[in-house]
Amino acid sequence: MQTAAILSTQEAARSRLYRRLADAYRWPVSDLPMVLKEMESALAQLGSDACEAAARLRASCHSAADTHALAVDHAALFAGPFLVPAPPYGSVYLEDKRQLMGDSTIDARQHYRSLGLDLSPEFKEAPDHISAELEFMHVLIVQGIAAIDAADYRLLSESICHQRIFLERHLGAWVRAFSDKVIEHARTDYYRNLAAVTRAFIAEDMDALPDLPADASERVMAQT
């Protein structure tokens, strides 16, 4: 059985990875090489099969000079101004009519609010944007780390259960279809490899999260 210290270290790597994945899908900025280095390190710490794709990802972005090409590809894939081939919103993949701001979007926001969170005024995207959902997983894992440190195993159980529910109903339910579209339509190795890392890691993470007692699920669902 894992000791609290080992579990906390593992969860810190998961938390860091989700946060850096969220950063990597935002508008490209000059500190991307640092973001990708941390991502690769976290994957290696977790022993992920996505490590090889992460190494290719970091190799595809060497310096700030690369950000112009990435910005062009980011706009073409995700932002428009015309119809885009890889919309970064969960509702497009989860709603029958592939619509924006559907019931699944509202549900994602309710998950955020269940922890007293909401989107920053500076964040101009929908609540089910890929970056927002990745960032929320980071927050849920941070909550779990705090529970480990406090030896609050009921809170830890609820945090893990919330992670599983959110992945099953949101991020994990649409990220494969999204990643496939990015890989198909990206013009840069960066976004192709980023999608491959995202798809592989989230599949692994969903497989690794334990099933928890029904009462933990019921408490989480009552909060959302």
Image (tube, rainbow, N blue to C red):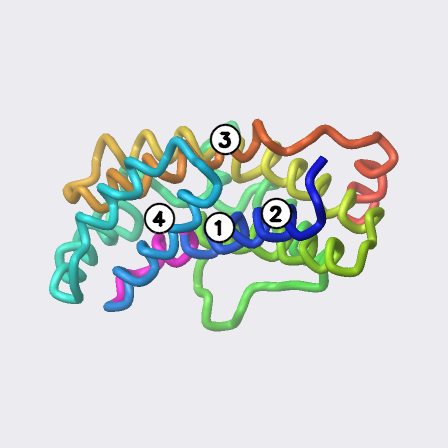
Which of the two marks, 4 or 1, is nearer to us in this view? 4
Residue 31 image position (x, y, % from top left): 28, 67
Callout 4, which amino acid?
Glu
Residues under labels 2 and 3: Cα distance? 22 Å
Q: Is residue 222 above or below residue 217?
A: below
Residue 47 location, quadrant? top left
| Residues at circles 2 and 3 in contact by the CB criterion of under 8 Å | no
Mark 2 or mark 3: which comes first in sequence? 2
Mark 4 or mark 3: which comes first in sequence? 4
- Crowding near pointer 4: few (<14 within 10 Å), some, many (20+)? many
Disc number for residue 204: 3
Q: Is residue 197 visible?
A: yes
Callout 2, which amino acid?
Ala
Mark 2 or mark 4: which comes first in sequence? 4
Mark 4 or mark 1: which comes first in sequence? 1
Residue at left offset 50%, top offset 39%: 91
Which of the two marks, 2 or 3, is nearer to us in this view? 3
Q: Mark 2 — residue?
A: 108
Residue at left offset 65%, top offset 36%: 164
Residues under labels 3 and 1: Cα distance? 13 Å
Q: Work out which residue is located at the far bottom of the displayed protein and give it.
A: 121
Residue 3 image position (x, y, % from top left): 70, 45
Residues under labels 4 and 3: Cα distance? 15 Å
Residue at left offset 43%, top offset 35%: 48
Q: Mark 4 — residue?
A: 40
Residues under labels 2 and 1: Cα distance? 17 Å
Label 4's element? helix
Q: Mark 1 — residue?
A: 18
Q: Viewer-proximal residue, 87 or 101?
A: 87
Callout 1, which amino acid?
Tyr
